[in-house]
Image (tube, coloured by chain):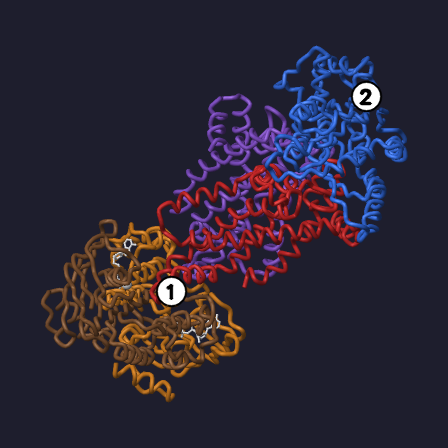
Chain colours: A red, B brown, C blue, D purple, E orange
């Protein structure tokens, strides 16, 4: 309670740095969630309904990648995008963009795996029916996605939660640069390391409040 | 025209669908009848491509994939009209179709909120929204009331006439089987017990066929 | 105390805009301990005011900080790990000599009852010997950072190699702040730079400075400019802001910077924390 | 490829420290996944089927907690269990046990939320039918859990993935103490911080291999 | 005995179930009939407690919750026997029940692999595995073949006799309605069009009732 009050106070104080941190956090989480969903949901659904050899392997790999440690994801992205790396010419080290890239790498498997699992329940019956009225596979995937839409909101919220909570990857590729790439989690980590536990917890509460607002906004679509 | 030869489908040793030969001429309407578990759905599912046979083959000469209505069809989330439009061929007059199937007043209703018979009606209309040379309907009127059944039978009859459709449908109701079909295919335990013109079906060859039709007669 | 520094910087920050062509920001890679001490947050607004350069400070473990520089993603490096700096220079990554430009002191902290009795020790090496002999809990950074290097050096001069699997020797593989938290929790001995300890003092009730100011406890910081012509950068997209890096190194040695650094900490902790090495 | 070879080599080298790390990692992940599942699955299912006021709020809070930053979870557990903390008398700081506690705090909401979402699909029809044959609510929950069992395997794998990949919480409460509480992710972080990127990536590959083995073992139950 | 008074259930202004008064005596067997969407399922669902009415009330004097079989019942994952056992009252002879419902040979089969009619049979058996003083069955035999339907009707008849059950069931088949019931309740658009003894139903009071029964007669 005490901490929540402090969190709100912190936010309302209108500290410029804090505002930047919150903005960067939201930009990063929203973009990475949306991009991961755009990639992961259709592929996941396609995986959930299809019956082909190798499906099992793909699903197992997807699931395995859910267990990719954030630090490792950060490291991989760092190795690729650092100036001397193969993709160094993009010149996006220490930017919000590269943080999004790392997050997408982390979140897409989660979204894919969950989408595959969610669509799997309805896939068989829907496919049989849709095929029977002459709907092509792409149309079937579209219809299946439509059926799963409420669950997709839930899945996207899982992705968002993971994205907003993540620290290992974004601190490595983002550099936790003040006024630029510092986000709430890296700030929390920083304050924790400094021993400012109270500030860290107040920041956490603020983060959770933001997350709660996002979840509340999404709720009607989730449980429609 | 549908030609089947040597078709076999086995479900983990307790059931085998086995059809050595079967020919359905263009424009024929075949009532597929037989007890529960005799393989009606399995046959229709194989012919529509929903599942694959284990061996043998069949051909549907029109080439195009047949229209197929499963026994428990899926109702897409959304309105009745959305559902019916999903089956739509561009030329179909959707409003007329909805009216014919008594769905016009229900067209804005969510499919998940329909009664059992209303759902079945919607799925039937969705089927007829497309144009097919060959139709497979698996117990299409099992939950509709008598008046509705008769109206839908009429709609189906018109559709088949207009498009010169080869029709296969399964049912447990003698009245439906006789009213709609030109041929009757009786399945028993995965095998054909009888395949004859509807007009002459009162004298089936096999003992099972005789027993089955007798049962129907007293009903 | 970090707050006022932050505010002063944001004040400067908003004051700029639309003045002449914007200078490309300088990318400074440094270790967490430097960043956590708050020195940079205090200095950079003045630097910006003088030169117009923005400085982006990426702080991470010593290894990553040097990794950033070797990857062409930093223009200048501020670290305190002699061995690793020498490797960096040997590989041709540095545009400058090893410029040891300032120092502060390591201190050994420990529980107030001082079970190993190190307060009486003559220097750090003796203190370490006593800790090992008493088998008192000791927390090591264990992360190959500058501080960890220093710790290893002291063990060497103490003539003992601690058994890393021993119960009392706790290698936590973590940053300075985190390591101090753990030492506090374990009521263990720990070696730390003074600035970080002082900045965290309030949250470390279980430990206090027991040994300080011995001559083998100097902590020397170096500024290294990244060499834009390093062999590793050839044919890659690395673009080093040498102008910025040189301006930064130069400014850090200017009289103004020297005064600022010498003043740092006096208001907050009542004592000087960093000492500039006059060239 | 190169890295995978290196990872296997690393593992087979039989380095004592590495073996300890792998063992601790597995102990921690398996325990925290199992405990979180035991708590989260039934509660999630109960939430998924029930219709009561406040359900929306609970679900939103659950979802919000999915976005609890690991560092923050670690910090909370740290504050509770540190020697001067309210639960300090347990004296479990810097042990595998407290790592499990922190992980359970992190993973349970994820498992709960996903279980609620998964069970929701079948809940209505099943409840109506089961109630009709006189099955009581606890029995209904049991039946619903049975129906969702294959999806539960998937959900547990998500939890496992999150657990094995997590670094922020476990390093804070576990202390990343060599030969004691060091796990693969903290080791990866450490090697990264040291600048030993190659070792870090080899360790990551090893982690992913372990994760792949677990996923492969679980696969038959998942897709039954 | 079931007493209903002033019962109302409204679905977003397009449908209202409205039953001012209805009494069903102990041991009565009521065939609930009427066109699709007339409210048969809604009535049974309210009486079984699956959904709540908007206003009015009803009482079931036996106190105990009635047994209720939805129109599209859920088949639990697992074998046929597992499903049937879920409905089990400790006294029921499960083997006899399985045999009576022709499920004995199928008892080890997974419920998801049954044909439509086999599934319905399983759900019916699961229902009768329990002992109820009051049963609500929503179109229990819509997908079973004629012979099976007759056998299951017999099983149901015995069950009702043994336990003195008050039975409500809905159907679209005249033969079933007449064979099983002692009373007929005709619903039209959510309201009662007719409620009378089966034996005297040939002369319904309302016009709708007359039309509906006439339709059935010619069928
Ligand atoms: N949840 C709901 N929301 C809105 N309307 C509903 C809902 N459930 C049922 N209805 C409507 O209420 C009416 C009565 O439905 P009900 O299921 O009781 O009919 P029924 O007599 O059982 O029909 P059928 O013979 O087709 O099973 C229908 O018109 C249906 O569309
Ligand atoms: N996937 C399956 N696995 C195993 N057995 C199956 C499977 N599908 C169907 N069967 C079995 O095959 C037999 C034929 O099933 P089918 O659905 O074709 O029967 P049907 O004639 O349509 O019956 P109904 O009148 O009940 O719909 C049944 O005994 C059924 O149990
Ligand atoms: Mg069938
Ligand atoms: Mg109904």
Is residue C177 something that shows in the picture?
A: no
Point out the frontmost of discs 1 and 2. 1
Q: Which residue is mark 1?
A: A135
Residue B136 against residue E92 in the figure, above or below: below
Q: Is E118 drawn above or below residue D11 in the view shown?
A: below
Mark 1 touches mark 2? (CB < 8 Å): no
- The residue lying at 36 percent from left, 64 percent from top is A129
Q: Is residue D149 visible?
A: yes
- The numbered disc on residue C210 is 2
- Residue C249: give x, y in percent of width and height: 79, 33
Q: Residue at x 63, y 60 (%)?
A: A217
Expressed as whole percent of the image width and height from the top left, the position of residue C202 reads: 81, 34
Give left or right: position of E193 versus C12: left
Circle 1 residues within 10 Å: few <14, some 14–19, many ≥20: some
Could you say where residue C112 lies in the image, as x and y percent from the top left?
80, 23
Foreground residue among E120 and E160: E120
* Disc 1 to disc 2, C-alpha distance: 78 Å
Viewer-proximal residue, C200 or D209?
A: D209
| Number of other residues with Cα within 10 Å of mark 2, as a class: few under 14, some 14 to 19, many 20 or more | many
Q: Is residue A150 left or right of residue A19?
A: left
Classify the position of ligand 1 by quadrant: top left, top right, bottom left or bottom right: bottom left
Residue E71, numbered label: none
Do the residues indicated by labels 1 and 2 lie within the same chain of the protein? Answer: no
Specify the quadrant that holds the N terminus of chain E. Answer: bottom left
């Amino acid at each position: 309670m005490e901490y929540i009050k402090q969190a709100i106070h912190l936010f309302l104080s209108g500290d410029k740095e804090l505002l930047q941190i919150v903005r960067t956090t939201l930009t990063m989480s929203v973009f990475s969630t949306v991009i991961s969903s755009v990639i992961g949901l259709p592929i996941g659904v396609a995986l959930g309904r299809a019956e082909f050899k190798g499906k099992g392997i793909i699903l197992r790999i997807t699931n395995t990648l859910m267990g990719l440690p954030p630090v490792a994801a950060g490291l991989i992205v760092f190795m690729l995008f650092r100036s001397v790396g193969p993709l160094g010419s993009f010149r996006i080290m220490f930017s919000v963009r590269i943080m999004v890239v790392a997050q997408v790498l982390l979140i897409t498997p989660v979204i894919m795996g969950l989408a595959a699992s969610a669509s799997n329940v309805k896939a068989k019956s829907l496919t049989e029916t849709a095929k029977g009225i002459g709907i092509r596979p792409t149309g079937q995937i579209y219809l299946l996605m439509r059926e799963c839409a409420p669950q997709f909101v839930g899945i996207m919220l899982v992705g968002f939660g993971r994205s907003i909570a993540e620290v290992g990857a974004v601190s490595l590729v983002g550099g936790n640069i003040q006024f630029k790439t510092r986000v709430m989690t890296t700030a929390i980590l920083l304050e924790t390391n400094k021993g400012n536990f109270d500030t860290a917890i107040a920041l956490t509460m603020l983060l959770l409040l933001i997350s709660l607002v996002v979840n509340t906004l999404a709720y009607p679509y989730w449980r429609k | 025209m549908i030609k089947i030869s040597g078709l076999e489908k086995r479900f983990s040793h307790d059931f085998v669908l086995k059809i050595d030969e079967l020919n359905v001429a263009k424009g024929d309407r075949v009532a597929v009848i037989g007890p529960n578990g005799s393989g009606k759905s399995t046959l229709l599912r194989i012919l529509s491509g929903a599942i694959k046979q284990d061996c043998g083959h069949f051909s549907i000469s029109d080439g195009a994939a047949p229209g197929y209505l499963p026994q428990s069809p899926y109702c897409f989330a959304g309105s009745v009209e959305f559902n019916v439009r999903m089956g739509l061929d561009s030329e179909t007059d959707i409003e007329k179709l909805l009216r014919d199937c008594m769905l016009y007043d229900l067209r804005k209703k969510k499919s998940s909120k329909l009664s059992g018979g209303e759902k079945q009606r919607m799925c039937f209309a969705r089927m007829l929204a497309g144009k097919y040379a060959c139709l497979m309907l698996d117990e299409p009127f099992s939950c509709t009331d008598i008046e509705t059944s008769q109206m839908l039978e009429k709609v189906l009859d018109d559709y088949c006439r207009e498009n010169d459709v080869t029709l296969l449908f399964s049912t447990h109701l003698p009245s439906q089987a006789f009213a709609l079909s030109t041929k009757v295919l009786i399945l028993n335990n995965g095998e054909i017990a009888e395949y004859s013109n509807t007009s002459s079906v009162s004298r089936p060859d096999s003992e099972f066929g005789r027993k089955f039709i007798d049962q129907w007669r007293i009903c | 105390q970090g707050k006022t520094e932050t505010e002063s910087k944001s004040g400067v920050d908003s004051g700029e805009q639309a003045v002449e062509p914007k200078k490309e920001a300088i990318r400074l890679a440094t270790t967490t301990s430097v960043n956590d001490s708050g020195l940079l947050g205090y200095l950079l607004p003045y630097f910006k005011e003088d030169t117009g350069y923005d400085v982006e400070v990426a702080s991470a473990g010593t290894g990553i900080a040097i990794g950033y520089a070797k990857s062409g993603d930093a223009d200048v490096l501020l670290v305190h790990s002699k061995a690793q700096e020498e490797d960096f220079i040997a590989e041709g990554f540095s545009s400058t000599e090893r410029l040891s430009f300032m120092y502060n002191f390591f201190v050994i902290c420990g529980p107030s009852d001082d079970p190993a009795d190190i307060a009486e020790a003559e220097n750090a090496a003796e203190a370490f010997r006593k800790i090992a002999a008493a088998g008192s809990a000791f927390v090591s950074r264990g992360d190959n950072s500058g501080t960890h290097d220093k710790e290893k050096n002291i063990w060497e001069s103490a003539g003992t190699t601690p058994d890393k699997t021993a119960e009392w020797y706790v290698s936590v593989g973590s940053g300075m702040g985190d390591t101090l938290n753990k030492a506090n929790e374990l009521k263990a001995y720990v070696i730390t730079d003074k600035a970080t300890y002082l900045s965290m003092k309030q949250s470390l009730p279980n430990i206090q400075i027991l040994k300080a100011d011995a001559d083998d406890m100097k902590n020397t910081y170096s500024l290294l400019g990244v060499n834009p012509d390093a062999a590793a950068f050839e044919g890659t997209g690395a673009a080093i802001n040498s102008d910025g890096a040189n301006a930064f190194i130069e400014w850090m040695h200017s009289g103004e910077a020297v005064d600022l650094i010498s003043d740092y900490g006096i208001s907050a902790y009542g004592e000087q924390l960093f000492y500039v090495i006059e060239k």
